Amino acid sequence: MDLIMGMNSGSSFDGIDVVLAETEMDADGFPKAPKFICGGSYDWPDDVKEIVTASFDNKVDMIGLNRLNYICGAVFAEKAVQFMKENNINPMDVKVLGLDTQTIYQEQPDHKAIDAMTDEQKADWPHRWLDGPYPAGMQMGDSSVIANLTNIDTVTHFRSADHTWGGSAAPLMPYLDFILFRKDEKPSMTLNIGGIANLHVGCKGRRDMFGFDTGPGNVISNYMCRKLFGVEYDKDGKIAASGNVNDELLNHFMHHPFFDRPVPRSGWIADYSAEYIDGVIEKFKHLPKEDIIATACAFTGAAVAKSMIDNIPEEIIKNTDKLYASGGGTRNPQIMKEIQARVPSNITVTTSADIGVPPEYKEAIKFATIAYSTIHCVPGNIPAAGHASQYAILGKIALAPRHIKGGAQL
Ligand SMILES: Nc1ncnc2c1ncn2[C@@H]1O[C@H](COP(=O)(O)OP(=O)(O)O)[C@@H](O)[C@H]1O
Ligand SMILES: [Mg+2]
């Protein structure tokens, strides 16, 4: 067995999750389902947090971004090393570290426009991005800084390979679901509730998979909690539980233009920007604050149900009895309750703990698994889910100093 490490800091920007897991290559050429060993969560340093948060709002200039890329690399490396010290892990025993680093900006692909392009237009590579509809995103955390400071081979920035082939590269979860469910006869549905929520169908046919963002996970509730209650998030859903869902506000949320984007769609916090949420708060300021938070939770649930019913074939929905949820949103009972109340009644909402994956660490396990696949040249994208035109080996590999050769010259 090989030890693999993964890290995640998502759009909620609530902290850095780190995991150690083990796996090995299976006879079918893919990694075995990774086995979770241990995990930890670490806070971003306050001074760095301030810059990253400003960068979400496009308020950091080029000079600042240049430094931020190195700073984030240093923070990720520091937390990885702290995690290894706390858990008595020797970096020399870890085969690979995988992390996407910190996304600060993401532009969505226009799949319709990409499909409409001629081969000649696609062959003009710079124009895919100069004035074309290809997606592009920006992640902060330099690969080489991390590999050099941790002394572990590091794979980062998983999205741009899929983007090159016109894929959304978000969500990336379908690959881990493929690894977890590829031996099952029946398809399974999974849902990750981070800042943004995404829904997936995992099955043994890699060409039959789905994966797309459903809308907000915690992003709206978090922002409203900060703005209306001065707290980072609605701990255990207590605020939402004390309010009532307001139908008019829910209806307003459900008219968000996000739903006009065909799947595979991906969302980014810009879809639920401060400006958008401030507008909602202003329009519905006559409501009790608790009702606004309760309705934000209901929106997460309603968006999951709508996205599922609109986009997943009825046959699959009918054949699915469980929805395995993961991400920090599983810790909010109101969100879980709202999802359960709104999805088709044959589906029971549970968490990925049922299949041995701690919900709060699924994303970090995903990045560890993709990194392990990358160093074995196994493609980690799922074209059927993200609409890339071909398979790609994801990520940028930075080798650790422990491999240094050079003989007497050094
Ligand atoms: N005890 C809890 N009660 C309610 N919500 C929680 C709890 N713990 C975490 N969360 C929610 O989960 C979010 C973090 O989820 P996470 O999966 O880490 O998202 P991301 O991948 O975007 O970082 C927090 O911002 C918060 O909204
Ligand atoms: Mg997080």
Image (tube, rainbow, N blue to C red):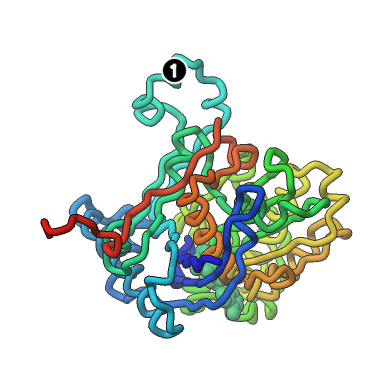
In the depicted structure, whether residue 389 falls above or below residue 36: above
Q: Position of residue 310 (x, y in %)?
A: 75, 43
Task: Count how many numbered circles sit on residues in the image.
Answer: 1
| Residue nearest the viewer, comparing 8 with 132 | 8
Residue 362 visible in the picture: yes
For residue 264, above or below residue 138: above
- Image quarter where the N terminus lies is bottom right
Towards the viewer: 166 or 288: 166
Task: Name the image quarter holding residue 292.
Answer: bottom right
Classify 392 as above or below 100: above
Residue drawn 65% across the image and 69% down it: 357
- What element does badge 1 sit on? helix
| Quarter containing the C terminus | bottom left
Badge 1 amino acid: Gln
Which residue is identified by label 1? 121
Q: Which quadrant would residue 287 be assigned to in this image?
A: bottom right
Horizontal side of residue 208 vs 374, given as left or right = right
User: Who's the residue at 50% across and 51% down the image?
Assistant: 268
Residue 222 visible within the image: no
Badge 1: how crowded within 10 Å, few (<14), some, or many (20+)?
A: few
> In the orientation shown, which residue stands out farthest toward the front?
408
Residue 11 x, y percent position in the rendering: 47, 61
The residue sitting at 49% across, 45% down in the picture is: 377
- Mark 1 close to ligand 1, CB under 8 Å: no
Picture coordinates of residue 390, whole percent (x, y): 55, 33
Residue found at the far left of this picture: 409
| Along the viewing direction, whichever of 249 and 128 lies nearer the viewer | 128
**Percent position of residue 191, x then y:** 67, 59
